[in-house]
Image (cartoon, rainbow, N blue to C red):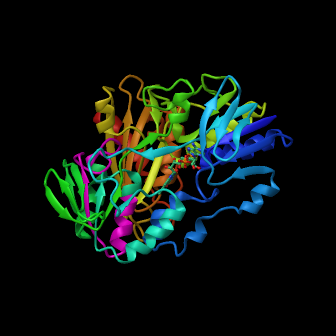
């Protein structure tokens, strides 16, 4: 059994390890265009912001460890095409390479901002760790930066740039940060925090040109005028990287992601897909979603690798727990907020509770807001939004599971909770939000 994997990110390496776990004798070959595998890109903004002192800390395994585990990684090697009839991939410097099973885990790219000037120097797409190391040196002498659209990674970069003493302007066509995902009341503390830190924000405005006479960025033209800047961070949404799959005639969905079944098999039974190049149905609406997170990519990769090697595992529709640090705040949620649910035409009831993360007298106590959305018929949880000083991740994970299990508002209103001064308050804000929702009805 020879399994070829295109991609050395979370999905590709998840697939490689899982395939070896099922069939230790399988020949597993991974192709990546990058210089490294097994590093966490998620930590890059925090090295830029100096919360983490070195890029070295982001490497999770050595190249030697992959050799020892029998995974043959080909670095800086591009796969050019897939020949499904011959069951080969065309690889730079290697020619036609055969496979029994192929896993496509080619990931994502930032959406093209679609404006002139993207070829100038001074334009940074935060992704590859080697490039991040080079850009980190540039940040030392950067005075002003424009963040072109406030996607999740860009939001982390805003804080990082502020920590580096760089003057930051965010330009985003939405009315507030991550407007497609977050509700305005939830993100307001973050916006206010940024304002306090001196971040300039142009909501409802677009970048129209990245400008610079001598090949380097000097200014950014927007629908609200010109901004002098020596750096632009591209923070547009993620698009699936699927030119190979498309040229090979594999079925792509409405998002441009590879269509896969529950086993992560594509429209070709010998080819699996995993990670941000695929699309996955949402558990409540069954609408396909693309560009999920690294944890989704890794789990999908494992599913694809297990099945490609002859094992059995299913990947389920997703409920998308998410969370992140944004300045002084943590924000997060599950599935939909009110804005997205309304845009999707979903009917819902919602209610919010303000709470605290520890006993009110315990040092470090922070406020937390929880908003719950429930379907109007059976009052099952369909979404949540949260902002607070801590404790967002655990609540998002719990509420995603509650959504998947069909838990109702009545059940959450009477849930038990941990009370211990240093880690939790007497009243759990999830439960209070559920009680408030029932009271409002
Ligand atoms: C700065 C940053 C912060 C992030 N923060 C978080 C976070 O906080 N939480 C979280 O869950 N996720 C985070 N992510 C993860 C991210 O959002 C994605 O979900 C994740 O990278 C998807 O993994 P993937 O393996 O599908 O794709 P990718 O990571 O994009 O990997 C794609 C791989 O395919 C290879 N490839 C593509 N085309 C070819 C080809 N033709 N030939 C050979 N190789 C090819 C690439 O070289 C690469 O190895 C972050 C990512 C970045 C960059």
Above or below, 273 against 170 in this view is above
Magenta stretch contains residue 139 = no
Q: Nearer the viewer, residue 309 or 199?
A: 309
Expressed as whole percent of the image width and height from the top left, the position of residue 410 reads: 44, 34
| Residue 238 left/right relative to 147 | right
Asked whether, in this view, residue 99 is left or right of residue 247, the answer is: right
Q: In the rendered view of the protein, which quadrant contains the C terminus? A: top left
Q: Nearer the viewer, residue 341 or 214?
A: 214
Is residue 259 shown to the viewer in this render? Answer: no
Where, by quadrant of the figure, is residue 360 drawn? bottom left
Residue 305 falls left or right of residue 223 = right
Q: Position of residue 28 (x, y in %)?
A: 76, 43
Residue 152 in percent (x, y) is at 40, 52
Residue 234 appears in the figure: yes
Quadrant in which the N terminus is drawn: top right
* Residue drawn at (62%, 59%) of the image: 36
The picture places residue 414, in percent across and down from the top left corner, at 47, 41
Query: In the rendered view, would you say 406 is above or below 22?
Result: above
Q: Nearer the viewer, residue 387 or 29?
A: 29
> Is residue 347 depicted above or below 421 in this figure?
above
The question of residue 179 being in magenta is answered with yes
User: Does residue 344 sit above or below 57 in this rendering?
Assistant: above
Q: Name the quadrant containing residue 264.
A: top right
The residue shown at (49%, 60%) is 424
Residue at image position (60%, 70%) is 56
Start-end of magenta stretch:
155-184
């Amino acid at each position: 059994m020879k399994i070829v994997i295109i991609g050395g990110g979370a999905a590709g390496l998840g697939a490689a390890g899982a395939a070896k776990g099922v069939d230790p004798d399988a020949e597993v070959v991974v192709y990546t265009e990058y210089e490294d595998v097994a590093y966490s890109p998620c930590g890059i903004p925090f090295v830029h912001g100096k919360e983490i002192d070195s890029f070295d800390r982001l490497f999770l395994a050595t190249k030697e460890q992959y050799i020892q585990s029998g995974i043959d990684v080909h670095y800086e090697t591009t796969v050019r095409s897939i020949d499904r009839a011959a069951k080969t991939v065309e690889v730079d410097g290697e020619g036609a390479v055969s496979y029994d099973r192929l896993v496509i885990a080619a990931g994502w790219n930032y959406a093209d901002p679609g404006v002139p000037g993207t070829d100038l120097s001074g334009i940074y797409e935060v992704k590859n760790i080697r490039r991040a190391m080079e850009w980190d040196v540039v940040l030392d002498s950067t005075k002003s930066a424009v963040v072109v659209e406030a996607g999740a990674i860009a939001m982390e970069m805003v804080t990082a740039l502020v920590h580096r003493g760089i003057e930051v302007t965010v330009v985003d066509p939405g009315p507030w940060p991550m407007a497609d995902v977050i509700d305005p009341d939830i993100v307001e503390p973050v916006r206010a925090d940024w304002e306090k830190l001196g971040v300039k924000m142009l909501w409802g405005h677009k970048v129209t040109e990245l400008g610079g006479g001598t090949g380097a960025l000097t200014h950014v033209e927007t629908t609200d005028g010109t901004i002098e800047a020596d750096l632009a961070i591209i923070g547009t949404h993620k698009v699936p990287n699927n030119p190979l799959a498309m040229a090979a005639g594999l079925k792509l969905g409405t998002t441009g992601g590879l269509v896969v079944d529950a086993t992560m098999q594509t429209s070709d039974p010998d080819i699996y897909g995993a990670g941000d190049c695929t699309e996955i149905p949402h558990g409540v609406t069954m609408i396909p979603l693309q560009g999920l997170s690294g944890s989704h990519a890794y789990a999908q990769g494992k599913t694809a690798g297990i099945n490609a090697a002859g094992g059995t595992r299913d990947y389920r529709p997703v409920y998308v727990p998410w969370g992140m640090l944004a300045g002084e705040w943590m924000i997060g949620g599950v599935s939909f907020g009110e804005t997205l649910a309304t845009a999707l035409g979903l009917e819902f009831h919602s209610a919010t509770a303000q709470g605290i993360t520890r006993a009110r007298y315990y040092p470090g106590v922070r406020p937390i807001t929880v908003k719950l959305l429930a379907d109007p018929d059976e009052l099952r949880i369909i979404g949540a939004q949260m902002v607070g000083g801590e404790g967002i991740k655990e609540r998002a994970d719990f509420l995603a599971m509650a959504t998947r299990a069909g838990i109702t508002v009545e059940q959450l209103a009477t849930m038990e909770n941990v009370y211990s001064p240093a880690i939790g308050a007497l009243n759990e804000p999830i439960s209070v939000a559920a009680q408030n929702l029932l009271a409002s009805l």
